[in-house]
Amino acid sequence: MKLYKLVLFGHLVQLAMPKEYGFRGFIRKNLPIIPETFKLILPQVKNDWKYKPDAGALWQLKVVHLATN
């Protein structure tokens, strides 16, 4: 049996924003937003005017995947 020591920083995944479920903006009649299944995405970082997946979180997920397989 192999043992691994992992040091992880921050959140590896986050919940998707309402627009990913088809909701536009926070309108009172749409609240609370409780989808049938929650979508998990990589944490997003703002780059210029767009959001991109956090490269550090992606690297950490790859390490966890390698260590658990």
Image: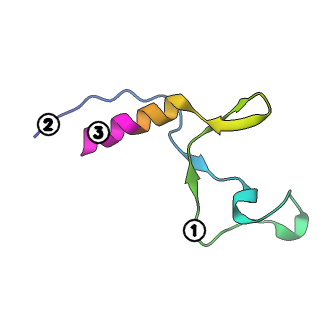
Q: Indicate which label's residue lies in the foreground, 2 or 3.
A: 3
**Residue under the image location 42 percent in, 33 percent down:** 60
Q: Main secondary structure of the magenta part?
A: helix
Q: Is residue 16 above or below residue 59?
A: below
Specify the quadrant of the image occupied by residue 7: top left
In the picture of the structure, the residue carrying the numbered disc 3 is 66
Compare residues 44 and 7 and report the one nearer the observer.
44
Residue type at tag 3: Leu
**Which of these two is toward me, 54 or 2?**
54
Q: Secondary structure at mark 1?
A: loop
Q: Which residue corresponds to mark 2?
A: 2
Q: Is residue 58 above or below residue 39?
A: above
Front one among 41 and 30: 41
The first of marks 2 and 3 along the sequence is 2
Q: At 23% across and 32% down in the image, what residue appears? A: 4
Residue at disc 2, secondary structure: loop
- Range of residues picked out in magenta: 62-69
Judged left or right of residue 50, residue 27 is right
Q: Quadrant of residue 44?
A: top right
Q: Secondary structure at mark 3?
A: helix
Residue name at image x 83 percent, y 68 percent: 30
